[in-house]
Amino acid sequence: CASSLSRVYCGAQAALLAPLCAKYVAIRAAALPAVVVSTVAQAVCIGGKDARTPMLAVALAALLNLGGDFVLVSRLGWGIAGAAWATALSQLAAMALLLGVLARRGLLSPEPPPPPPTEAAALPPRPPRLATVRAILGF
């Protein structure tokens, strides 16, 4: 199945490309935990109304990936493995930046932050409400 699918995409050269693809995927798979952690950290930032930090992390990763591709592929001649390493290392750097920001904000501490004060806490508790058909059915 995989060989016929790769022939659809790659044509007659699929057999030549398979080892290169396997090498690239193996290197990139090593960075998968960093990708998952970065994605969660970006979601935490955006959930806290901070879109700037994830944008900076993605920009940093893009610049490092571009520079890494230039050095590892063009200068050192590592080929597709160099491209994979450049991408993996750029994702690790983005993860480190995001985790550093979240740590400075105290969002990585093992203890949950205290709940924010609310106006509802100052109000006296409501008396119990009688259950009516309308209340139960949500009308």
Image (cartoon, rainbow, N blue to C red):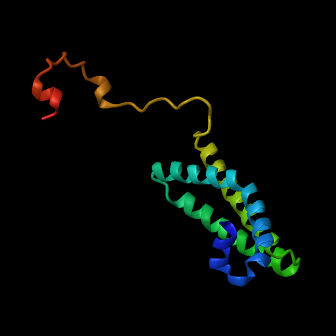
Asked if residue 108 can be seen in this view, the reply is yes
Q: Is residue 41 left or right of residue 73?
A: left
138 w.r.t. 69: above or below:
above
Residue furthest bottom as drawn: 12
Compare residues 104 and 33 and report the one nearer the observer: 33
The residue shown at (68%, 82%) is 11
The residue shown at (38%, 30%) is 117
Asked if residue 98 can be seen in this view, the reply is no
72 w.r.t. 33: above or below:
below
Compare residues 99 and 90 and report the one nearer the observer: 90
**Residue 32: quadrant of the picture:** bottom right
Q: Is residue 138 left or right of residue 22?
A: left
Question: Residue 82, how many percent across, how many down?
Answer: 81, 71
How many numbered tags mark residues here? 0
The quadrant in which the C terminus is found is: top left
The residue shown at (67%, 67%) is 2
The quadrant in which the N terminus is found is: bottom right
Residue furthest right as drawn: 76
Question: Residue 20, how many percent across, how many down?
Answer: 79, 72
Question: Residue 77, how many percent across, how many down?
Answer: 87, 78
50 w.r.t. 111: above or below:
below
**Residue 4: quadrant of the picture:** bottom right
The residue shown at (63%, 43%) is 103
Q: Is residue 100 left or right of residue 105?
A: right
Compare residues 131 and 119 and report the one nearer the observer: 131
Question: Residue 72, how many percent across, how many down?
Answer: 83, 74
